[in-house]
Amino acid sequence: MARQTIDQPFWWGKYTLDVGQCLQINIGNASHAVLRQAQEWQLYYNMVADTNGNDEKWRVTISAGTSGEYEVMERYVYHQTGASLDILPLPADRPVVTRPLSPLHLPSGEEITLYVSTPLWMQISPGEVQVQEVPIYRPSDTWFGPSTMKGELCYASMTHGRPALADIPLRPHRAITPVLIRNQADSALTLERLNLPVPYLSLFVSDNGQLWTEPVTMIRTSDQDTATMEIGKCAPAEAHGASLVTAPRVSESRNILSNTISTLFG
């Protein structure tokens, strides 16, 4: 068969492939392909680094066999493959560290909402069994914590947290989180970096195709060494007509999390 472009509102979903057919998903410069054979599924992708470009365009095609060159090829062997293939977006598997455009100083008693954009993973599931999940764009690693001995390995976002939603472009490979920061301490809070625990967040899609997570509230309390983080129970109000796409990776103890300042703000 010739290459067939699939007309649908999102790049993810449930697909049906005959033996020998290949599903290819292109998002910006990133390309992922899944080929069905009689007794194996073959996964192809390139380890494209995350960028600050808009990469708004995406395309899904089905063709006979693969086309193009890929850095990685993985094989998953079965007695007999079925025709069903599920593709879903997932939040990152580690916290994501982002920065405002320049350091912010939040006086005592003030609050601000920053809109944070974080990278997504692609989950590949032939039938009902997940076989792999890969980043759409590979983000850079970074360490977040008060010292090299205390902290955690995170991903560094290539985008900045912004106070105006209009400054966040539509990106099919990233999710937006509204982060409300409240300073209830007596002194000003200097915000240079923000650590967002995205494995605790769900994914929702709004009526314009943008992916969102629940809103997050980070509260610096009167004790200057502690803070709390609260995760909303549904999609944010900004995500018009939103519906749930995927549940969080980590679901336990996600309503209110107590942290030290150094685990959330830097």
Image (cartoon, helix red, strand yellow):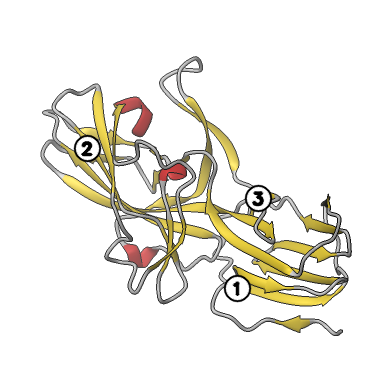
Q: Quick check: 192 above or below 116?
A: above
Q: Which residue is mark 1?
A: 57
The part of the image, by quadrant, that contains residue 265 is: top left
Amino acid type assigned to the residue bearing label 2 in the image: Ile
Q: Which of labels 2 and 1 is toward the front?
A: 2
Q: Using the numbered discs, state the Cα–Cα distance from disc 3 to disc 2 in whole angstroms.
A: 33 Å
Q: Which residue is mark 3?
A: 133
At label 2, counting other C-alpha atoms closer than 10 Å, the crowd grade (few under 14, some 14-19, many 20 or more) is many
x, y percent for residue 252: 39, 38
Q: Which residue is more in the foreground, 136 or 79?
A: 79
Q: Is residue 217 left or right of residue 252?
A: left
Q: Secondary structure at mark 3?
A: strand
Q: Using the numbered discs, state the Cα–Cα distance from disc 2 to disc 1 in whole angstroms.
A: 37 Å
Q: Is residue 150 left or right of residue 187?
A: right
x, y percent for residue 59: 66, 75
Q: Which residue is mark 2?
A: 219
Q: Which mark is residue 68?
A: none
Q: Which residue is more in the foreground, 157 or 236?
A: 236
x, y percent for residue 16: 72, 74
Q: Using the numbered discs, state the Cα–Cα distance from disc 3 to disc 1 in whole angstroms.
A: 21 Å
| Residue 98 seen from this side | no
- Residue under the point 69% across and 49% down: 132
Q: Which of labels 3 and 1 is toward the front?
A: 3
Q: Which residue is more in the foreground, 177 or 33?
A: 33
Amino acid type assigned to the residue bearing label 3 in the image: Glu
- Residue under the point 86% across and 71% down: 19
Q: Is residue 184 left or right of residue 98?
A: left
